[in-house]
Image (spheres, helix red, strand yellow):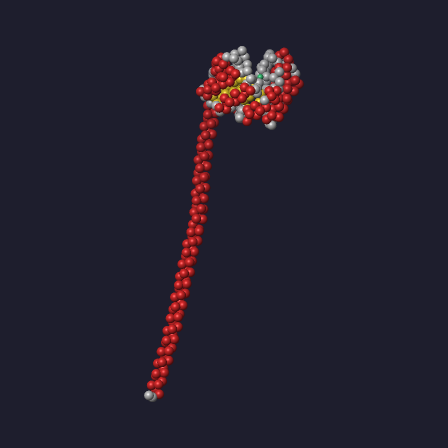
């Protein structure tokens, strides 16, 4: 062979080797690229899964937020409905208050063991009353005083001794008055309100033989000047009179006395012997309920009601010289 042929063979061989090398290199690069793609795909998958996971994590958060908002608007709606309901109720109450007749049941001269029986009836019927209590009886039965007050009824002073001798002078009257106020505060832990009832009432004649006819006009004026209000009554049960053992007559007296009265302050006595008072009490409550009366007490008495009682001569009745 000549030199040209040898050179040709060498050249072709070299080309073959180079292309083989290139081919080898290319396939390794492809393999590398494929591996890289696989890795990236894995990463993408992982990432997207991660995203999904993150989304899953976020979704409950969003849901919680949305749920919270929904719950809050629901609560707001419920509250608005409640407000409307209460406003309607309030208007109804105000209208009823205007339309309804009123009765204040008052019990004097206790407390005594009979008070417990009266409380049982009142509480069972969910009726509240006012008790004008005597200081020396309060000292004997402090637990009954506390129970009466605790059951939501009103306790007001009715002198310490209930002795008409208190009507001798201003000094005898005010000493007794201060004593009952002190007993009141020591038992109930609150100051006695400036509302009370005179033993025998503001127009009593028992005072005549002690301080004279001028005594009640003078003492009532002085008490009013000192900011006190005294309460009388406009219906009696007669349980402190000769008919106190005749429950039928007592009930009749209450009903007759209440005729044509839309504002009643009824007088009873919760002294121990007054079994008839306990006997007629359910029928008395029935009567006032059936006739549209609202039971009221001096515990939540309104200024309008006090004014009304002043007008009707039940509170702060002007006592003129006789
Ligand atoms: Zn009395």
- Residue lying at the far front of the rendered structure: 113
Say if residue 61 shows up in the picture: yes
Instruction: Tell me: residue 294, above or below residue 75.
Output: above
Instruction: Tell me: residue 88, above or below residue 174.
Output: below
Say if residue 305 shows up in the picture: no
Task: Looking at the picture, tell me which residue is in the foreground, 215 or 131.
Answer: 131
Q: Position of residue 28 (x, y in %)?
A: 39, 70
Residue under the point 42% across and 58% down: 46
In this rendering, position of residue 18 left or right of residue 183: left
Q: Position of residue 88 (x, y in %)?
A: 45, 31
Q: Position of residue 87 (x, y in %)?
A: 46, 32
In this rendering, position of residue 42 left or right of residue 187: left
Q: Indicate the quadrant of ligand 1 in the picture.
A: top right
The number of numbered discs placed on residues in the rendered structure image is 0
Residue under the point 51% across and 15% down: 276
- Residue lying at the far bottom of the rendered structure: 2
Task: Looking at the picture, tell me which residue is in the foreground, 253 or 33.
Answer: 33
Q: Quadrant of residue 200?
A: top right
The N terminus: image quadrant: bottom left
Residue under the point 48% across and 19% down: 282
Residue under the point 35% across and 85% down: 6
Q: Position of residue 43 (x, y in %)?
A: 42, 60
Instruction: Tell me: residue 6, above or below residue 103.
Output: below
The C terminus: image quadrant: top right
């Amino acid at each position: 062979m000549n030199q040209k042929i040898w050179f040709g063979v060498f050249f072709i061989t070299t080309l073959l080797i180079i292309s083989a090398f290139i081919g080898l290199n290319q396939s390794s690069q492809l393999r590398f690229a494929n591996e890289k793609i696989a890795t990236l795909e894995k990463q993408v998958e992982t990432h997207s899964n991660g995203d999904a996971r993150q989304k899953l994590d976020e979704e409950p958060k969003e849901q919680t937020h949305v749920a919270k908002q929904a719950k809050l608007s629901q609560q707001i709606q419920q509250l608005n409905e409640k407000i409307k309901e209460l406003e309607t109720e309030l208007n109804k109450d105000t209208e009823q208050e205007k339309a309804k007749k009123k009765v204040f049941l008052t019990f004097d001269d206790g407390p005594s063991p009979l008070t417990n029986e009266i409380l049982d009836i009142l509480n069972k019927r969910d009726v509240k009353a006012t008790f004008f209590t005597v200081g020396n009886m309060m000292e004997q039965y402090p637990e009954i005083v506390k129970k009466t007050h605790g059951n939501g009824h009103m306790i007001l002073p009715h002198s310490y001794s209930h002795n008409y001798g208190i009507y001798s002078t201003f000094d005898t009257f005010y000493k007794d008055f201060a004593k009952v106020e002190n007993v009141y505060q020591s038992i109930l832990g609150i100051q006695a309100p400036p509302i009370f009832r005179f033993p025998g009432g503001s127009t009593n004649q028992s005072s005549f033989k002690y301080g004279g006819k001028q005594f009640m006009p003078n003492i009532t004026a002085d008490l009013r000047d000192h900011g006190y209000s005294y309460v009388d009554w406009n219906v009696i049960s007669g349980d402190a009179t000769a008919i106190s053992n005749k429950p039928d007559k007592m009930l009749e007296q209450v009903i007759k006395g209440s005729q044509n009265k839309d504002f009643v302050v009824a007088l009873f006595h919760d002294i121990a012997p007054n079994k008839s008072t306990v006997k007629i009490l359910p029928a008395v409550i029935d009567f006032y309920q059936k006739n549209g009366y609202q039971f009221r007490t001096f515990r939540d008495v309104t200024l309008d009601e006090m004014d009304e009682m002043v007008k009707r001569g039940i509170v702060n009745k002007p006592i003129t010289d006789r």
